[in-house]
């Protein structure tokens, strides 16, 4: 569910390009004009704007934006202007280069995109970096994290609603056995989480809870400081209740001493056209504060205005 507010009548793409060109001319950049256009166009419209801008002015719009903008606002505009698959490829590449055991961005991309969108991101990764996402993930990660992340980013899960209840029961039992023995890196546990459809995993985990009287995530909380257990819990949340995962990322990003703009920008730009309305509802329910109020309190200036436009705040 997109939160993007798109005008009822969209001006011709040539007008958008002309206005963006004007935003870069004269004394200083007209950031408000950039937000009024790019902050209210969907992915297909933004792609057309980029193509038309390059054809008209002989310059990549992203390069023009890069020259004119700075700091968090620049990062947010550039991520937003990219096609979704290009954006995921860029975020994944950054995550491999800066990988630490607490970095969950690779898992987030692998588990919250549709199978088709993850495939498009892998193809965009080939085009942009002349190598595969899988090889970079394998090269930059280690141990149990590599064992989990390589098959996650390589997955092409079935997307249908069909569920095999016999399989759900047997795999719930298998998961419980492995977790009871603290065999968190077990091949079968990782196989189930990295290959089964989201509908099948949901059925398995529902059976797990009914049969063993506990959420699987509770059973994976044995050691709160264990980063691998943390990514296993986050993987399950992303596959089954992604809005709760994103709500938590936003809550931690906004409530930190000093905002984590990287996480805030990533979630807003990647979810604005997907499920931001559900994430906003979850945030409000969990924090008793609307997300737009929390963002307005913690951010400033053009960066704040763009984020509010993307999450569908009426005045932005």
Image (tube, rainbow, N blue to C red):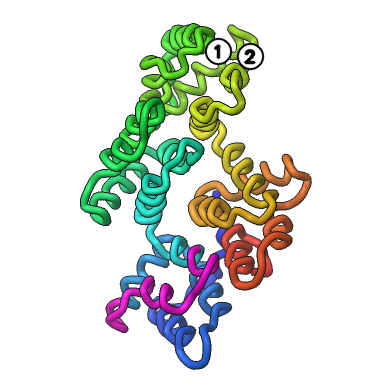
Q: Position of residue 45 (x, y in %)?
A: 41, 66
- Residue 209 showing in the rendered view: yes
Q: Does residue 16 sit above or below 161 in this rendering?
A: below
Q: Position of residue 228 (x, y in %)?
A: 49, 27
Judge whether residue 235 is colored magenta.
Answer: no
Q: Of residues 141 and 196, which is closer to you in this image? A: 141
As helix, strand or loop, the secondary structure at mark 1 comes to helix
Residue corresponding to mark 2 = 214
Indicate whether residue 62 is drawn in magenta.
Answer: yes
| Position of 255 relative to 298 (above/below) | above
Q: Main secondary structure of the magenta part?
A: helix
Marks 1 and 2 in Cβ contact (< 8 Å): yes
Res. 272 visible in picture: no
How many discs appear?
2
Q: Is residue 257 left or right of residue 120?
A: right
Q: Residue at x 29, y 50 (%)?
A: 125
The quarter of the picture where residue 185 lies is top left
**Outermost residue, left direction?**
130
Choose between 225 and 244: the one closer to the eye.
225
Query: Dot 2 lies on which element?
Result: loop
Q: Which residue is mark 1?
A: 208
Residue 35, horizontal then vertical, whole percent: 54, 73
Instruction: Read off the magenta span.
Output: 54-75
At x 56%, y 20%, the residue is 220
**Lateral position of residue 64 relative to residue 59, left or right:** right
Within 10 Å of disc 1 (Cα), the crowding (few <14, some 14-19, many 20+) is many
Q: Nearer the viewer, residue 182 or 250?
A: 182
Q: Residue at x 58, y 67 (%)?
A: 306
Question: Around disc 2, counting alpha carbons within 10 Å, would you say few (fewer than 14), some (14 to 19), or many (20 or more)?
Answer: few
Looking at the picture, how far across and down is residue 216, in whole percent? 57, 18
Quadrant in the picture for the C terminus: bottom right
């Amino acid at each position: 569910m997109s939160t993007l507010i798109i005008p009822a009548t969209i001006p011709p793409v040539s007008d958008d390009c002309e206005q963006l060109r004007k935003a870069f001319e004269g004394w200083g950049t007209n950031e408000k004009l950039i937000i009024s256009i790019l902050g209210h166009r969907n992915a297909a419209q933004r792609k057309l704007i980029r193509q038309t801008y390059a054809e008209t002015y002989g310059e990549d719009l992203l390069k023009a934006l890069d020259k004119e903008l700075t700091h968090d606002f620049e990062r947010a505009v550039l991520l937003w202007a990219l096609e979704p698959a290009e954006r995921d490829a860029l975020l994944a590449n950054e995550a491999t280069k800066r990988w630490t055991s607490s970095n969950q961005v690779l898992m987030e991309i692998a588990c919250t995109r549709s199978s088709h969108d993850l495939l498009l991101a892998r193809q965009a990764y080939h085009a942009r970096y002349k190598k595969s996402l899988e090889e970079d993930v394998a090269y930059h990660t280690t141990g149990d994290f590599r064992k989990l992340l390589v098959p996650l980013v390589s997955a092409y899960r079935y997307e249908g609603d069909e569920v095999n209840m016999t399989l759900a029961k047997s795999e719930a039992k298998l998961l419980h056995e492995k977790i009871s023995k603290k065999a968190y890196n077990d091949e079968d546990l990782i196989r189930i989480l990295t290959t089964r459809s989201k509908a099948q995993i949901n059925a398995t985990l529902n059976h797990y809870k009914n049969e063993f009287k506990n959420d699987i995530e509770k059973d994976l909380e044995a050691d709160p400081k264990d980063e691998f257990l943390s990514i296993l819990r986050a993987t399950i949340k992303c596959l089954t209740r992604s809005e709760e995962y994103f709500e938590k990322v936003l809550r931690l990003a906004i409530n930190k001493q000093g905002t984590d703009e990287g996480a805030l920008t990533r979630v807003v730009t990647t979810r604005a056209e997907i499920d931001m309305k559900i994430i906003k509802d979850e945030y409000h329910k969990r924090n008793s504060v609307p997300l737009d109020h929390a963002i307005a309190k913690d951010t400033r200036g053009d960066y704040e205005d763009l984020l509010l436009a993307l999450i569908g705040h009426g005045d932005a």
